[in-house]
Image (spheres, helix red, strand yellow):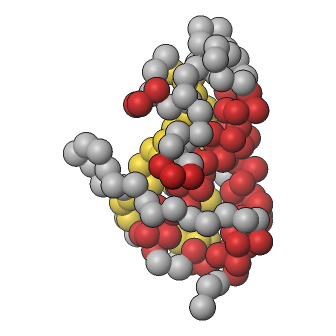
Amino acid sequence: MAGAIEKKLSDLGITLPTPAAPIANYVAAVRSGNLITVSGQLCFGDEGKLVATGQLGGTVSMEDGQKAARACAINLIAQLKAAVGDLDKVVRVVRLGGFINSAPGYADGPKVMNGASDLMVEVFGDKGRHARSTVGVSALPVNAAVEIEGLFEVA
């Protein structure tokens, strides 16, 4: 039987994907005590296709960047579920770190990251409020528009 968080995901029309396997020498998630660090997740959406490719402030609109950030957040939650089994064990979304593939001078990365931050609050309520960093970068793997990593406290 699905827990409260999985019901919330369902109510939002979100089906968690099968978590992506690491593509290099790292693991998807590491648990240390009550903290789980989830490696950076790209903006893969339905059918394993990137939600947005290219640079924000270039070929990618802010709205598409926010959709990409939301897709990253869904992928983070999928990895978290794989690591803990039950999303109701999440005590707190502690931190998100976002990497925005940005054209020179693009300064709206924090607005793009809201796509992920807003979803965490929608799904986890007050437990989803978190600290975060947003960094503009000149390139990301497979030309993804956004990559996000997360730190979560679990019971």
In the rendered view, does 36 fall on the left or right side of 24?
A: right
> Taking 29 as reference, is 144 above or below it?
above
> Taking 9 as reference, is 56 above or below it?
above
Location of residue 5 by image quarter: bottom right
Q: Seen from this angle, which residue lies furthest left?
A: 25
Q: Nearer the viewer, residue 77 or 15?
A: 15
Which residue corresponds to the image point at 70% horizontal and 33% vertical from the top-left?
Answer: 64
> Taking 95 as reference, is 9 above or below it?
below
Whether residue 131 is visible to the viewer of this picture, yes or no, is no
**At which x and y percent is residue 69?**
63, 41
Location of residue 31 by image quarter: bottom left
Q: How many labels does the image show?
A: 0
Q: Seen from this angle, which residue lies furthest bottom?
A: 1
**At which x and y percent is residue 72?**
57, 47
Q: Seen from this angle, which residue lies furthest front?
A: 47
Q: Nearer the viewer, residue 45 or 25?
A: 45
Q: In which quarter of the image is the N terminus?
A: bottom right
**At which x and y percent is residue 100?**
57, 28
Which residue corresponds to the image point at 32% horizontal and 50% vertical from the top-left?
Answer: 22
Q: Nearer the viewer, residue 128 or 148?
A: 148
Which residue corresponds to the image point at 41% horizontal and 30% vertical from the top-left?
Answer: 142
Which residue corresponds to the image point at 40% horizontal and 55% vertical from the top-left?
Answer: 20
**At which x and y percent is residue 106?**
67, 14
Whether residue 87 is visible to the viewer of this picture, yes or no, is yes
